[in-house]
């Protein structure tokens, strides 16, 4: 019975089952949303399982304080239990919440009451992310969802269960397993590779193996072997979201973002690229075949033909990390030093701006930021997030938009590949405030912060929601009333669609730089770009020009300021 082909010009406006263009587009969009939400949820569940195994082994993680705070938020008894018991009970609570059929999970309850009321009125109050994903996949099955509006509203509900559920769980677990990020200065771009060291790139999204790799790179025996082969040391560098996790928590250098993953191999100076899942090009083994680089796949979920497969599991993490590092060290002798070329030099970047770290930087609370917004010193806040896309000149969409927003006194928070682009461009340094408008520049210099705040990886867009909720509380309004906006100038992945729509459903109007696959239905376009304003107080906009996107964001922020009378 398919696939359906709708050709209005020839009069073919329905598929054989009766589906029209509106239904087909809405169904495909829901399928995209649920795929992105599932990627975040599975990432989060991996970390929940890691938390459980750690507790079973008697561990407590890197941030017991955050562990206990999270436990209290999730209704887990913390006294008089020790940290190990708290971790064990919290793991069970988080797993149950991911599959909960209740309309308000702990993450959802952290949203402002006014925002939750909007969701209730629209019928999109999210349940556990697993529950929403299962229903969404049922709805896209043949012969189930036939109303495009209903499908799209459930898309918003599924996206909300990602942002306030699956992604938030992943962020929380990473924080108490590996440490809540704190402000630090580190180095970014391809110049972080070292011509005299064994270079190993860590690429993907799951931080479990990488934490062990960091410890393994300091092993005296491995370092001695590297020196015996002519290297002066072992240099770990990050890529994409794994890179952000390592940068935020350990100051590990970050080589680049999504479209740098082949370029780092093409330097000829990379001994191994270690990958797990999400955003891994299937082409990497073919690219590496032109050089000496080993591509090492570690996730059973993301087997990569042509790569070395060394499966990772938590119980043997130490052994696996040492095996991988040893392979890379031995490969150093095969590097063609005359052919190797490392472009440029590293750029310094301030990173680690979790909400907790930002609060500390502002003197212990968010009141200074709220005052700056009220006084107009900072006109608004824009979350510039998302991927790189080959349809857009690499990083140009991100960097051009960010620079324009800064010049208009709009503070930028960034995650994922967008944040890395800003870092490579030097916009995550204190000195970058000199290029901002006078109000924003003054605010940044007063508190010693850069005008672009790196909040983490893609799952850490949950930190943007946490920040928005805290500001909404300060102003005693819903998130939709705040001078906030989102942007994904170079998005490409299904995760980015889920992120954009949980921003919108939370009340944050968001501008995409690449058109999503919705142009086949004007009704779907109208619902997302116009009608949602009357449902959730925000819309999804599309503007390929970064300057045009800056105009849209500024106009939206000014409208919200006028409505708040600030």
Image (cartoon, rainbow, N blue to C red):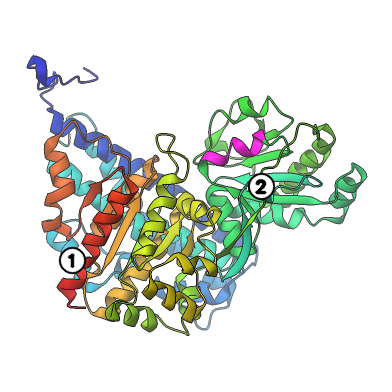
Query: Magenta residues?
Result: 259-266
Q: Residue at x 78, y 38 (%)?
A: 327
Label 1 element class: helix
Mark 1, residue position: 559
Q: To which residue does mark 2 refer?
A: 344
Q: Compare marks 1 and 2 and give the one earlier in the sequence.
A: 2
Mark closer to the observer (1, 2) = 2
Tell me: residue 499, above or below residue 554: above
User: Which residue: 25% across, 79% down?
Assistant: 475
**Quadrant where the C terminus is found in the figure:** bottom left
Q: Residues within 10 Å of mark 1 (few under 14, many from 20)?
A: some
Secondary element at image label 2: loop
Determine the image quadrant of residue 492: top left
Residue 126 visible at all = no
Residue 506 left/right relative to 220: left
Q: Position of residue 349 (x, y in %)?
A: 58, 62
Q: Answer with left or right where residue 230 lies relative to residue 273.
A: right
Residue at the far left in the pictured view: 11
Compared across the picture, whether 315 is left or right of 125 comes to right
Disc 1 and disc 2: Cα gap in Å? 43 Å
């Amino acid at each position: 019975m398919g696939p359906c082909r709708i050709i209005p010009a020839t009069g073919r406006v329905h598929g054989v089952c009766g589906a029209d263009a509106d239904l087909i587009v809405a169904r495909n969009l829901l399928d995209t949303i649920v795929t992105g939400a599932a990627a975040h949820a599975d990432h989060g569940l991996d970390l929940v399982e890691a938390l459980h195994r750690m507790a079973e082994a008697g561990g407590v993680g890197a941030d017991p304080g955050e562990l206990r705070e999270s436990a209290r938020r999730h209704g887990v008894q913390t006294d008089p239990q020790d940290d190990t018991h708290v971790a064990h009970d919290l793991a069970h609570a988080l797993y149950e919440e991911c599959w909960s059929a209740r309309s308000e999970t702990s993450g959802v309850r952290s949203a402002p009451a006014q925002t939750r009321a909007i969701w209730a009125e629209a019928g999109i109050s999210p349940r556990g992310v697993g529950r929403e994903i299962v229903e969404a996949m049922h709805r896209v099955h043949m012969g189930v969802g036939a109303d495009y509006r209903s499908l799209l509203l459930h898309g918003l509900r599924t996206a909300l269960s990602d942002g306030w559920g699956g992604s938030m769980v992943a962020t929380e677990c990473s924080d108490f397993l590996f440490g809540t990020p704190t402000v630090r200065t580190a180095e970014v771009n391809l110049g972080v590779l070292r011509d005299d060291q064994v270079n190993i790139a860590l690429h993907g999204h799951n931080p479990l193996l990488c934490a062990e790799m960091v410890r393994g790179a300091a092993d005296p025996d491995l370092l001695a072997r590297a020196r015996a082969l002519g290297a002066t040391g072992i240099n770990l560098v990050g890529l994409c979201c794994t890179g952000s996790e390592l940068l935020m928590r350990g100051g590990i250098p970050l080589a680049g973002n999504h479209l740098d993953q082949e370029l780092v191999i093409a330097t000829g100076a990379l001994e191994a690229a270690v990958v797990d899942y999400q955003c891994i090009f299937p082409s990497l083994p073919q690219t590496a075949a032109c050089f000496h680089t080993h591509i090492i796949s570690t996730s059973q979920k993301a087997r990569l033909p042509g790569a070395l497969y060394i499966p990772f599991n938590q119980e043997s993490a130490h052994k696996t990390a040492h095996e991988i590092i040893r392979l890379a060290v031995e490969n150093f002798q095969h590097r063609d030093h005359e052919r190797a070329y490392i472009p440029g030099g590293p750029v310094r970047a301030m990173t680690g701006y979790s909400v907790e770290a930002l609060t500390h930087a502002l003197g212990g609370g968010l009141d200074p930021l709220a005052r700056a917004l009220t006084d107009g010193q900072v006109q608004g806040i824009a979350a510039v997030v998302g991927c790189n896309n080959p349809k857009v000149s690499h990083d140009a969409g991100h960097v051009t938009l960010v620079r324009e927003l800064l010049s208009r006194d709009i503070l930028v928070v960034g995650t994922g590949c967008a944040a890395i682009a800003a870092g490579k461009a030097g916009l995550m340094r204190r000195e970058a405030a000199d290029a901002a408008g006078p109000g924003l520049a003054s605010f940044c210099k007063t508190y010693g912060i850069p005008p672009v705040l790196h909040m983490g990886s893609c799952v850490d867009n949950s930190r943007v929601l946490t920040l928005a909720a805290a500001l909404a509380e300060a102003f005693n309004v819903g998130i939709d009333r705040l001078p906030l906006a989102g942007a994904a100038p170079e998005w490409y992945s299904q995760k980015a669609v889920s992120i954009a729509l949980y921003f919108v459903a939370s009340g944050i109007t968001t501008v995409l730089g690449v058109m999503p696959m919705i142009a086949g239905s004007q009704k779907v376009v109208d619902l997302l770009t116009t009608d949602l304003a009357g449902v959730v107080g925000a819309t999804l906009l599309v503007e390929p020009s970064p300057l045009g996107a800056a105009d849209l964001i500024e106009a939206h922020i000014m409208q919200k300021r006028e409505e708040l009378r600030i």
